[in-house]
Amino acid sequence: NAGVTQTPKFQVLKTGQSMTLQCAQDMNHNSMYWYRQDPGMGLRLIYYSASEGTTDKGEVPNGYNVSRLNKREFSLRLESAAPSQTSVYFCASSGTSYNEQFFGPGTRLTVL
Amino acid sequence: TQLLEQSPQFLSIQEGENLTVYCNSSSVFSSLQWYRQEPGEGPVLLVTVVTGGEVKKLKRLTFQFGDARKDSSLHITAAQPGDTGLYLCAGARTNTDKLIFGTGTRLQVFP
C-alpha cells in the first residue's frame, strides 16, 4: 500500500497562474483533508471532504477550490496564485474512530 | 484564534537528556493526538489519548492526557538524535470533528 500520495512534490508559479494539486489514498478512507503549513503557524485546514460527494470549508479556504473526484482522490486548485499562497501543502485521509490522520509527503509551492 | 498552544516552541538538547513538551488549551477535547514530523515529510501519528488522566507509553515516549481533557504532555526519556523533529499535538472536540493542530515544538537532539 502506498498510503497517501501527492503530486507534484515541488512547484514554482508566477502570480496569477493556476494549478491543481493532486492527492490519492488507497486505504479506503471516507474523509480527506487539505492543509497548509507555514512557519510558526502549525497546520491549518483549507478544505475537507467527509465523504465522497461532499466538501466543506476549513479555517483558510479563500483562494482555493477542491474536488472530491471519487473515494480515492481529492484535488486542490489554485485559480489565481498569490505570493501569500507560498506554503507547504499536505493532503491527509482518515477512516478511524478518532479521526486519526494519515498524511502525504507534501507539495512545496512557491509563488513569485 | 489558536486553540492549542504548545511549549516550548524550540528545544535543543544533548543525547541522553530528558524533556517534556506541553500542549494546552482552554477548551475540552474528546481526544488528543500527537504527531511527529521529520524534515521534508508529512506528520506521522504517534498516539491518541481519549480518557482524562490517561497515560500511554511508546518505548521512551510517555503521553498523558489531563484529567479535565484540556491539556496533554509528551515526555521523552534519554533522548536520541533519532527523536529530532517537529512534534505536533492535535485535538478534536467531538469524535467526528475536524482536528485542531497546535503550533508545534521543534526538537533537536545532538549526539
Image: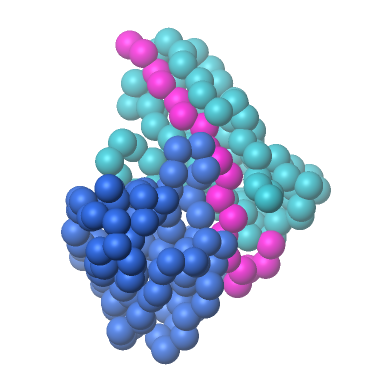
- The residue under the point 51% across, 24% down is B10
Q: Is the C terminus of chain B in the top left, top right, bottom left or bottom right quadrant?
A: top left
The image position of residue B73, as x and y in percent, is: 63, 35
- Which color scheme is applied? by chain
Residue found farthest to the front: A16
Residue B101 drawn in magenta? yes
Q: Who is closer to the viewer here, B68 or B53?
A: B68
Q: Colour of chain B?
A: cyan
The image position of residue A71, as x and y in percent, is: 33, 82
Residue found farthest to the bottom: A53
Q: Colour of chain A?
A: blue
- In the displayed structure, B41 sits above or below B95; it is above
Asked whether, in this view, residue A82 is left or right of residue A45, the answer is left
Q: Is residue B111 visible?
A: yes
The image position of residue A43, as x and y in percent, is: 48, 50
Q: Which residues are magenta?
A: B93-111
- The residue under the point 46% across, 77% down is A49
The image position of residue B5, as x and y in percent, is: 65, 39
Q: Who is closer to the viewer here, A28 or B107?
A: B107
Q: Who is closer to the viewer here, B49 or A55?
A: A55
Asked whether, in this view, residue B88 is left or right of residue B25, the answer is left
Q: Who is closer to the viewer here, A68 or A26?
A: A68
Residue B107 drawn in magenta? yes
Q: Quadrant of residue A4?
A: bottom left
- In the displayed structure, A69 sits above or below A93; it is below
